[in-house]
Image (cartoon, rainbow, N blue to C red):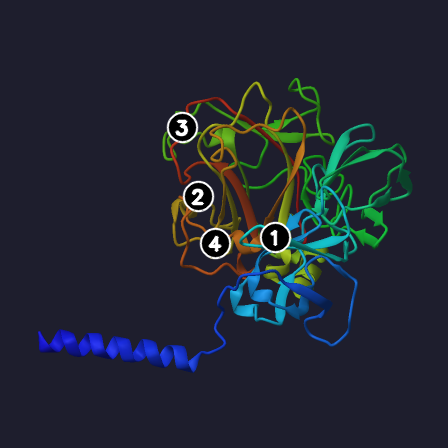
Amino acid sequence: MTKYIGILAALLLFAACDLQDYPDRFRATSGVPSIDFVRYADRDVFITQAYMDEVLCVVGSNLCSVHEVYFNDQPAILNTSYITDHTLLVSVPSKAATEKTDKIYFKTASGDVVTYDFKVLPPAPKINAMSNEWAKPGETVTLSGRYFIDVTGVQMPGVEVTEYTVDSGESITFTVPEGANPGPVEVYTASGSGRSSFQYKDSRNMLFDWDGTYGMALGYGWRAGDKVLCAPGTHAFPALDGNYIAFSSDFDGTPYGAWAEDPCSFDYWPGEVGSAHAPLYSFDTFSQYINKYGVGGLCLKFEILVPTSNPWTGVALQLMFSSENQVSESDMNNNYFSDDDFPRAVWEPWIATGSFDTGDKWQTVSIPLTDFNKKSNGSACATKFDDSYLHGLAFFVWGGSAEGKAGTPIIAIDNIRVVPL
């Protein structure tokens, strides 16, 4: 019993010391705050406006009474560690206001509200992605990104987009105009302009376009792609850009059920540098990208179409770059497909809802090479992926992380390329 009394006494002493050692700890107060001015958090400059995501210092009195802060109608995140009676550090919300009032609202726990005149300025727009980088003129596409606020214009390479719809500051939808050329897309706003890092009709470092126009018309190996090659008109949906490949088979939904290798895979198993089937890394543009950006700065891209009539409901798409230690023109084998010491990307877009289709439209898929770090079941692979794997490439439908539903999906793929992030 004496032991427990001693422990209790020690805890009380610690608590007392804690209160004495931290006299400035946050304690909510009653009443209402008063605001003297707002300045930047990192420099002593008074301001009446700031960009989204900037950190501000509010100076006033009784700021410990503040329970919530809103910029226009958007809530800010408060951290009591950065609130004292006379200063309050807060970041401007990154989401655009639905109703712009040009005010900050300081709300207390009792419901009192103090307002302060302040404008939130959006930064220059940032374009992250385009729904289909290979869309034809007349097709509808969506740009996704941030800060699409007070948009004044959208520019495709060589031609202006005259009609567009902005949704919540994070997407812009428009029809690709006639005359659009390959290249980056630009968005203009009152805060400045943003240019995409991706390119419309991007043919840079095209590995396989299945036509031989920008990339290779076929792979090489046991499943070179000829068994899944489709000409325009093969299916009811339109081709993206000439020939494409399409995987399709009856699946029972189990990740490791019967393997449909012929109808659901293609390989590129390379030979020597300079040969007809040279390693991918030796291609001029690919080699330049590896040297300039490294594996961490590159991504695998391709366009995909899964029709609504044949949705994807189970089993994963395995994406595997291969090194010469695993497979080559002189040592053809697919043993590495099931080798879980071999890193790969595992793509399962149907998991979120149980079913995936692209609405009979082509969509661009982008997978950073840093995501090539999985086993066949989608769990983490202990082997680090590096540029020694950039010799060959294989796509095949098999394995995955979850049970799905039986189905007969059609997974059409075109324009496989590796480009900078």
Q: Earlier in the sequence, mark 4 or mark 1?
A: 1
Between the residue at mark 4 and the residue at mark 1, the CA separation in whole angstroms equals 52 Å
- The residue under label 2 is 334
Dots 4, 1 in contact, CB < 8 A:
no
Instruction: Please indicate whether residue 175 sits to the left or right of residue 322 in the image.
Output: right
* Residue 300 in view (yes/no): yes
First in residue order: circle 1 vs circle 3: 1
Q: Position of residue 140 (x, y in %)?
A: 76, 30
> Given the image, on which type of amino acid does mark 2 rest?
Asn
Q: Please tell me which of labels 2 and 1 falls first in the chain.
A: 1
C-alpha separation, residue under disc 2 versus residue under disc 3 = 23 Å
Q: Residue under circle 4?
A: 373
What's the residue at 59%, 27% (across, down)? Answer: 306
Q: Residue furthest front?
A: 31
Residue indicated by mark 3 = 253
First-in-chain label (3 vs 4)? 3
Q: Is residue 224 left or right of residue 149?
A: left
